[in-house]
Amino acid sequence: MKILVTGGAGYIGSHTCIELLKENYDVVVLDNFSNSCEESLNRVQKITGKNLFFYKLDLLEGPSLHQVFEDHKIDAVIHFAGLKAVGESTTIPLKYYQNNLTGTLNLLSVMEKFNVKNLVFSSSATVYGDPATLPIKEEFPLSVTNPYGRTKLMIEEILKDLYQSDKEWNIALLRYFNPVGAHESGEIGEDPQGLPNNLMPYISQVAVGLLPRLSVFGGDYDTPDGTGVRDYIHVTDLALGHVQTLPKLVSNPGVVIYNLGTGNGFSVLEMIKGVEKASGKQISYEITDRRPGDIAACFADASKAKKELGWEATKSLEDMCNDTWNWQKKNPMGYRNHPKKD
Ligand code: WQD
């Protein structure tokens, strides 16, 4: 089977390409390299010893997207491509709507034209907003508080409408919790452009000496140690979740929705301690004001994915911290040790 992976050069995309190639899928990657680079795909091929096809293109470029489907008989699409920074989305909402919504609509139109109707969509736990209780189940009410999250929720609704109009579609909405870590080889990992928005790359850049100190956003939440609690999931576990979703699509399930999390919550201070243990470094931090829009705690009930996909996260917090540090220490400047090839 041949799988098209949009955003396949990105953090989760590149890790998913590894697991797809290991499962002997043929892989075609589309990426505009706006938040990634070709080097990650070179390393995916080096790690697996297998080749993949890739096209540097933007989902907003209709004609080139059409050509990809002319060139390849695609069996299913895993759609990662999109802008994903919560804070940034509040400052440039139009760019987020244009890129995430229009890009997805272009992709769906070309898929329909070529009768490719199997889709795995990269959604996010952010669609749950601030849940009334924990752990979070797939049938919980949905609410979003920022343009990034709204694009995810809108695309989920678009996909449900598409299925209602044409029952030949098979669509999996995968709601990720907090992806962290890196491939065990340390060859690929999270490589944020500029200052990291997310906790773990920020901590690992403090550990490796790129940044002086971490600001802990709030120490007065109603959590065991007062700092924010999240369901951190190893990116390889997350990648395997995508691979194990594909056979489900083949069984013509219509629209299916799964939480991809571990079911465990860890606090900011616990993550700091985990990276200190993995790296042997002391992480300098200070507790500052809460970040607007943050919630106190969030973790998944992942039992539905276990029951219906036979998938569950297996890597521990120690694995996540060790693999994060292994990537960071081997690639202090991320992929920038290898200049982008435009
Ligand atoms: C985690 C915890 C912060 C940075 C977001 C998106 C979500 C998904 C994952 C895309 C929180 C604290 C963070 C820092 C800190 N992204 N923190 N200092 O906000 O849970 O989720 O990223 O799909 O959609 O909403 O992740 O890593 O930003 O924050 O104290 O410098 O770390 O307050 O408690 P978040 P995060």
Image: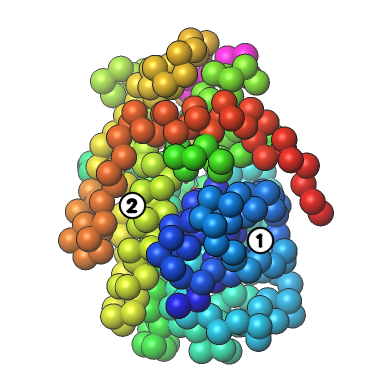
Return the x and y of residue 102 as percentages of the image width and height. Answer: 63, 69
Indicate the quadrant where residue 49 lies. Answer: bottom right
Apparent side of residue 252 relative to residue 147 in the rendered image (left or right): left
Quadrant that contains the C terminus: bottom right
How dense is the environment of label 1, judged by Cα within 10 Å: few (below 14), some, or many (20 and up)?
A: many
Return the x and y of residue 269 as percentages of the image width and height. Answer: 38, 19
- Can I make out residue 273 in this image? yes
Residue name at image x 64 percent, y 53 percent:
42
Report if residue 212 lies within the magenta region: yes
Residue name at image x 69 percent, y 67 percent:
55
Q: Would you name the residue on which mark 1 appears?
A: 31
Mark 2 falls on what kind of element?
Answer: strand
Q: Nearer the viewer, residue 109 or 220?
A: 109
User: Amino acid type of disc 2?
Assistant: Leu
Q: Identify the magenta region.
A: 211-217
User: Amino acid type of disc 1?
Assistant: Asp
Report if residue 179 lies within the magenta region: no
Q: Would you name the residue on which mark 2 appears?
A: 260
Residue name at image x 37 percent, y 70 percent:
246
Q: Nearer the viewer, residue 48 or 11?
A: 48
Q: On screen, 166 above or below 197?
A: below
Q: CA distance from mark 2 to mark 1?
A: 23 Å
Colour treatment of the image: rainbow
| Circle on res. 8 | none
Return the x and y of residue 299 as percentages of the image width and height. Answer: 29, 41
